[in-house]
Image: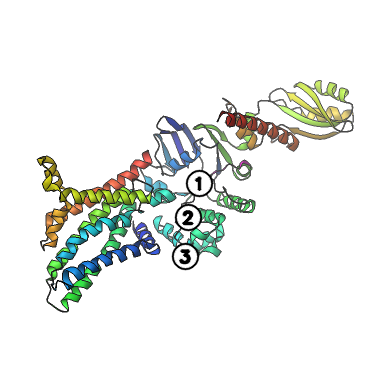
Amino acid sequence: MIEVKNLSKHYGEKKAVDDISFTIEDGIILGFLGPNGAGKSTTMNILTGYISATDGEVLINGANILEEPQKAKAQIGYLPEMPPLYMDMTVKEYLDFIFDLKKCKLVREQHIGKICELVKITDVYDRIIKNLSKGYKQRVGIAQALINNPPIIILDEPTVGLDPKQIVEIKNLIKHLGQKRTVILSSHILSEIQAVCDKVIIINKGKVAANDTAENISKAISSDHKLIVSVEGPKDDILKCIKGIKGVVSVEAGIEKEPKVFEYTIETEDKADIRRELFRRLSEKKWAILSLGTTELTLEDIFLKITMGEGIEIPTLKETPEAPANDNETKADVMEEQKSETADEEKTDGGDE
Amino acid sequence: MGAIFRREMNAFFTSPIAYVYFAVFNVFAGIFFFSYCIAAGTTDMSGIFINMFTILLFLIPVLTMKLLSEERKQKTDQCLLTSPVSLTGIVLGKYFAALCVFAISLITFLVYALVISAYAPLNWTVIAGNIVGLFLLGAAFISIGLFISGLTENQILAVIGTFVVLMLIFFSYLFVDSINNTLIKKIITAISFQSRYEKFTTGVFSITGMLFFVSVAVIFNFLAIRTLERRRWA
């Protein structure tokens, strides 16, 4: 288990990390998200003992990274943003060196061989690292983090600069690693984090902005409680029918998607689940429901909302309701909206420069 | 420490650094051997060792320039500093690797001594004292170079910085007689490398000289460790 207590790191006047605390349980894959300069890499560097914190403490399975550095570091395998590779060595020489550096007591050939097979670098085992492609260098970087079977693996942007095929392979590898170990992963590719991670910590301006599962954060951050439903039938009658359901705050008809099929956006009271009643009433009138979904946020939406929005607070969830059905179109709309907001802000920023 | 020592030794011999160092070292050692022993027709090798002091001023910076600076530049220090190895282990591993390469180059003088001994009787104790003296001088210089290499991530700055510091040490003592201020004069004499090294070249095995060079090596290795530690807190 990793415990981070009141961690701060100041570079002169700048607070790169500002009094953050969180706990990472064993055996989960944790996604570390945040815009550039948010303090992700600084936090990771402190967790691994590469740099020291200005204040606060880090405990790796009970070992303080400053007071018992060797004990704490022995439990971590770290791949920094730039793989720490010696370009003049062959993959074999390099992994042998790391094996010795980490004082690994396992059977050398067997252990290194297994890792090479796992990260698929067996075919470049005797080649000089300098001559390898970016993808292979990244894999060698992951291989060095796995030497000595550390229970905690920290990967700082492991897929940066890789092609889509390599990204999928690394993603599968991370999933595989997460079966037996705690994996902390930072990435800018949010879909990747969403697909791989059990939990997400979003860091913004040196503070933890969110710490939960992506699904829970999404639910907590959605201030509105809306349903999107496509129904075939007379528009005005349907509007009247929906308005009559208990718990409905407002309802609006949208575009005519098909002949006589309209999309209705229904806003409900907090915690009101009107889906069953809605189905009953519409089916009584023989108006067919063609789709029903909520305005669930993707991780990308959450990320943008937290990092772009001002002062958004994540309320604590007391209970996890059933996962709502997805509505891809709604998601796409929200994403588009968020993206255009981002683009607008970027334009403004660029203008300022 | 062992892993880092082996890695550095490997790096010395897979890059041109060790070969360039050996080549230049042997060229000058050979010139001095010819001038002071062969041409002069003597078995006294002191002349070679006196002049090797100046050669080390140029050569040691080459040996130490990338020891710590390159790690920082290539970000491989992240690998070392996040591994279960102490900072002392990292610094000493690198220090002993450079010292080992330097020690290998001193074998040349044993070969010269063997050549001379084939033709005339030789005072082996004096030769051994000279070699030990040069070894201790090199050990002190290497520690200074290692420390300066830890201050920058630029190899060129490291080599120039070390060279300038070693030259200052050399020239300050060279012109010590022309300094009027007694205090400065005392300080320069107290920290003089030449005065202590010269004793070895005259055949005197100086314990104080040995302690001085060992102390310099310990102090600068300690400073190199503190430099790494300081960077973590920066």
Amino acid type at mark 2? Gln
Please determine whether, in this image, residue A217 is positioned above or below residue B8. Answer: above
- Magenta residues span A183-190
Residue that carries the numbered disc 1 in the rendered image: A81
Amino acid type at mark 1? Glu
Of marks 1 and 2, the one in the foreground: 1
Pinpoint residue B4: horizontal percent, then vertical percent.
36, 57
- At x 73%, y 32%, the residue is A294
Question: Do the dots labelled 1 and 2 sit on one chain?
Answer: yes
Per the rendering, the mark at residue A109 is 3
Please determine whether, in this image, residue A149 is positioned above or below residue A204. Answer: below
- At x 37%, y 51%, the residue is B155
Q: How crowded is mark 2: few (under 14 residues within 10 Å), some or many (20 or more)?
A: many
Q: Which of marks 3 and 2 is nearer the N terminus?
A: 3
Q: Does the magenta stretch include residue B186?
A: no
Q: What element carries label 2?
A: helix
